[in-house]
Image (cartoon, rainbow, N blue to C red):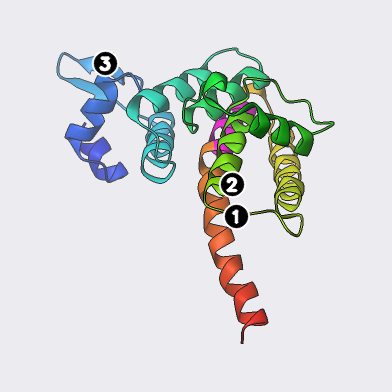
Amino acid sequence: MAEFSTTSGIPVATIKYYLREKLLPAGESETANQASYGAAHLDRLRLIRALIDVGGLSVVSARSVLEAIDSNASLPEAFKVAQRSVSAAIEPGDLEPADLASIDALLEGWHVSPENPGRLAAARVLSAFRGVGQTDERGWYARYAEAALLIAAADLDEIQSRPDRAAKAETVVVGTVLGDALISALRRAAQEHVTSQRYS
């Protein structure tokens, strides 16, 4: 355990916590007080840290997405788990029907289930925009939807390039969780760039 901690740069107490929470599989027992940890454990530990530290997942959500990776669930099921892990729980009944209708019109032709967390969150965002007096004067929302389709295609192209189901499932989870963080970060950089061009 001490060597594993040194190699990973993660404190022993944190590793033991991840073991107790079933995020990290146990090492192979060598003696009553020693276990062996290999490259697979190190990879899993890095994944856990990425999901929690960069992706902002709770330990419970991280466990759920790791279970989705380790299971034989289909890729659409893995997507559902990953999407729910990064999305606030929203009840459709808490949303204004007009906001849901606006989102459904924006997503016309898309195959999106009524309970999709993105659909529900988008309706809530439209409600908030309206509440603070922001309007869609120049196709703001439609342009966001177009960008979202490009991002989703990039996600699926990357997933398809992976060699097997386990690697595909891991990319589903990592791409969904860390992809949200990457999109936010790139948007901020792009805003500065475009602002500098328009308001020199």
Q: Is residue 73 above or below residue 156?
A: above
- Tell me the residue at 29%/20% (across/down): 21
Q: Which residue is nearer to you in this view: 65 or 25?
A: 65
Check if residue 169 falls in the magenta segment: yes
Which mark is in front, 1 or 3?
Answer: 1
Q: Secondary structure at mark 2?
A: helix
Q: Which residue is mark 1?
A: 134
In the image, residue 169 sits, relative to residue 189, either above or below, namely: above
What residue is shown with label 2?
130
In the image, taking residue 98 as reference, residue 33 lies left or right, namely left
Residue 157 placed where, x, y %? 75, 39
Where, quadrant-wise, is the C terminus in this rendering? bottom right
Q: Outermost residue, bottom direction?
A: 200
| CA gap, disc 2 and disc 3 | 59 Å
Crowd class of label 3 (few under 14; some 14 to 19; many from 20; radius 10 Å): few
Residue type at mark 1 is: Gln
Asked whether 191 or 75 is in front, the reply is 191
Point out residue 27 in the picture as x, y percentages from the top left corner: 31, 21
Query: From the viewer's perspective, is 104 left or right of 68?
Result: right
Could you say whether the residue bearing mark 3 is in a helix, strand or loop?
strand
Q: Is residue 120 on the magenta stretch?
A: no
Quadrant location, the N terminus: top left
Q: What are the residue bounds of the magenta stretch? A: 167-176
Does the CB distance between marks 1 and 2 fall below 8 Å? Answer: yes
- Please report whichever mark, 2 or 3, sits nearer to the chain's N-terminal start: 3
Horizontally, residue 115 falls left or right of residue 24, namely: right
Q: Position of residue 85 (x, y in %)?
A: 48, 28
Which quadrant of the structure image shows residue 4? top left
Q: Which residue is mark 3?
A: 29
